[in-house]
Image (spheres, rainbow, N blue to C red):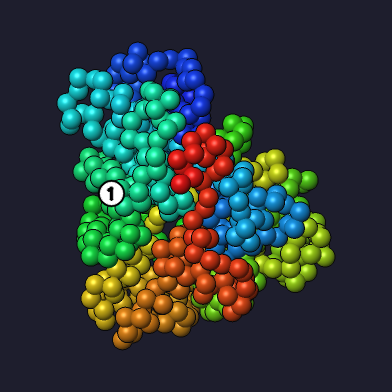
């Protein structure tokens, strides 16, 4: 983010607009056909797509909240917060939900910027070996964004080029889910072919990012042979990619520590001066309401909190629980005694008496700034532990009962047992072996739930494995919620359907 946090100011003038703005006449400061005169200009457009990813409407506020609240891991703490948020939490959201609409718009803006870069490169008389490594970043950005859109909404409008005919685009039909995934796979294969093995900053995709998301895409589709093959290929090349497990799980969530494990990140700078860009809203949304050493600066808004059963059912000998939760907090000053979570409400009535998410709030790097919105958090969109779990899950579906699949899981579990570097290892979680295919499948979904807790993965797991009626039953982590198959998809925003009734079909 440090390299391109201002570039959206320029890219916004290139007649780039999303599906949500198709009814508007595009007016730009710079016309694309006259702007793209060199590959440097293409690179600026590419970086604009990644700048849009750091907008609040994507994964640190609107879209991110949607994914977290719809899961069985996170619930509303503040009963007076936005109805849009509460409706996603209760799975009663309607097509008029503005949180959904804002997330939809920013995702199509990312795609539009990527498409503009690709089209701009096509105007130049450059050799493929020169331009393809640049536009491969745009192919990755487009695939990454459609990967989120299709999992949330199902069939959606698919654009692989800039929109130059507003009337025609306003009458577009939805693209079938299978075709969207086929396009995602094609884009990721192009990116994997042309991107370098590594990048100086993991907020810029490398070959490893394309490969990891290819494996994840295949897994999501239920194409287990290809998911296993791609994850296995990644594991074999982890040295080339300079990727490996970080020994201390806590370091993955410390903004001041750079580790090898993250594969692709959203990199925040601790600068909230750009408003909706580069400002990290996820930290305060998941933070406890309290004052600390920052004087009157608020650390959090206590909007989202883990369901209590998520904490109480998690074995305390698993080091990941200590990293994932804040079960105590100091109120009033840094020298105040530690208050257990059972007293959070008494310290500030806007808090729930439940442990809060600590993965992003404990070591956020920067001074929180206004209302805690600034951080230097590096949000891992995918990391090596997930690749290992993808390989294990897919292999179990292809060839059950292998020691190879056990070994992938046990690498992840060993780190959880070892705890902090230098600490005395525990016996939890134990290695797996000898499980039936069904039991292994259950185990791996639970392992993903714990290892990737609060990392915006759980809702997608619920959807792809059709777990809704199970996890939202009375015995679930959040208790009973009314759930039907219709809840697996979020409704396309009503504003879009009004502009184009085909999107409602």
> Picture coordinates of residue 210 (x, y %)?
30, 48
Along the line of sight, the residue nearer the viewer: 166 or 392: 166
> Picture coordinates of residue 167 (x, y %)?
43, 25
The correct choice, above or below, for 398 with respect to 143 in the image is: below
Residue displayed at 53% across by 50% down:
491
The correct choice, above or below, for 147 with respect to 454 in the image is: above
> Picture coordinates of residue 198 (x, y %)?
29, 45
> Looking at the image, can residue 62 be seen?
no
The correct choice, above or below, for 309 with respect to 187 in the image is: below
Residue 498 relative to residue 176: left or right: right
> Looking at the image, can residue 73 be seen?
yes
Residue that protrudes farthest toward the bottom in the picture: 434
Q: Quadrant of residue 464?
A: bottom left
The correct choice, above or below, for 16 with respect to 406 in the image is: above
Along the line of sight, the residue nearer the viewer: 312 or 224: 224
Within-10-Å neighbours for mark 1: few <14, some 14–19, many 20+: few
**Residue occupied by mark 1:** 182
Residue displayed at 46% across by 50% down:
153
| Secondary-structure class at tag 1 | helix
Residue 302 relative to residue 225: left or right: right
> Picture coordinates of residue 187 (x, y %)?
28, 43
Residue 125 relative to residue 103: left or right: left
Q: Quadrant of residue 157?
A: top left
How many labels were placed on the picture?
1
Residue displayed at 38% across by 70% down:
412
Residue displayed at 25% across by 25% down:
122
Q: Quadrant of residue 401?
A: bottom left
Along the line of sight, the residue nearer the viewer: 364 or 344: 344
């Amino acid at each position: 983010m440090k390299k391109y946090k201002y570039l959206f100011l320029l890219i916004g003038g290139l007649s780039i607009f999303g599906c949500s703005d198709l009814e508007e006449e595009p007016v730009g400061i710079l016309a694309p056909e006259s702007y793209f005169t060199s590959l440097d200009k293409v690179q600026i457009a590419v970086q604009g797509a990644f700048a849009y990813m750091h907008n609040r409407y994507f994964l640190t506020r609107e879209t991110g909240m949607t994914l977290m609240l719809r899961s069985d891991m996170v619930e509303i703490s503040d009963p007076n917060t936005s109805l849009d948020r509460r409706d996603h939490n209760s799975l009663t959201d309607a097509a008029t939900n503005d949180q959904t609409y804002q997330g939809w718009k920013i995702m199509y803006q990312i795609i539009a910027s990527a498409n503009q870069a690709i089209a701009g490169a096509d105007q130049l008389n450059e050799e493929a070996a020169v331009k393809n490594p640049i536009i491969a970043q745009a192919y990755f950005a487009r695939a990454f964004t459609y990967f989120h859109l299709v999992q949330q909404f199902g069939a959606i409008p698919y654009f692989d080029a800039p929109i130059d005919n507003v009337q025609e685009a306003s009458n577009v039909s939805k693209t079938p889910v299978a075709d969207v995934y086929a396009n995602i796979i094609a884009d990721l294969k192009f990116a994997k072919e042309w991107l370098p093995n590594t990048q100086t900053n993991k907020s810029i995709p490398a070959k490893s990012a394309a490969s990891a998301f290819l494996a994840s895409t295949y897994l999501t589709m239920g194409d287990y042979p290809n998911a296993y093959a791609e994850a296995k290929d990644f594991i074999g090349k982890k040295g080339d990619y300079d990727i490996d497990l970080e020994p201390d799980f806590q370091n993955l969530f410390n903004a001041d520590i750079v580790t090898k494990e993250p594969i692709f990140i959203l990199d925040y700078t601790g600068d909230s001066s750009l408003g909706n860009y580069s400002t990290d809203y996820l930290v305060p949304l998941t933070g406890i309401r309290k004052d600390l050493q920052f004087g009157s600066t608020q650390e959090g808004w206590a909007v989202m909190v883990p369901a209590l059963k998520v904490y109480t059912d998690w074995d305390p000998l698993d080091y990941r629980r200590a990293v994932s939760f804040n079960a105590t907090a100091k109120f009033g000053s840094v020298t105040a005694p530690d208050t257990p979570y059972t007293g959070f409400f008494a310290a500030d009535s806007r808090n729930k008496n439940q442990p809060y998410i600590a993965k992003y709030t404990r070591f956020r790097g920067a001074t929180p700034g206004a209302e805690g919105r600034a951080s230097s958090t590096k949000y891992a969109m995918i990391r090596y532990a997930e690749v290992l779990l993808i390989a294990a899950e897919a292999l179990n579906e292809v060839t059950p009962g292998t020691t190879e699949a056990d070994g992938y899981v046990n690498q992840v579990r060993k780190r959880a047992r070892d705890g902090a570097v230098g600490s005395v290892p525990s016996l939890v979680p134990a290695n797996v072996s000898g499980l039936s295919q069904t039991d292994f499948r259950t185990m791996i979904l639970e392992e993903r739930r714990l290892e990737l807790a609060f990392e915006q993965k759980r809702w997608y797991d619920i959807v792809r494995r059709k777990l809704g009626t199970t996890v939202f039953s009375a015995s679930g982590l959040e208790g009973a919620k009314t759930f039907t198959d219709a809840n697996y998809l979020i409704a396309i925003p009503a504003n879009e359907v009004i502009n184009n009734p085909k999107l409602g079909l």
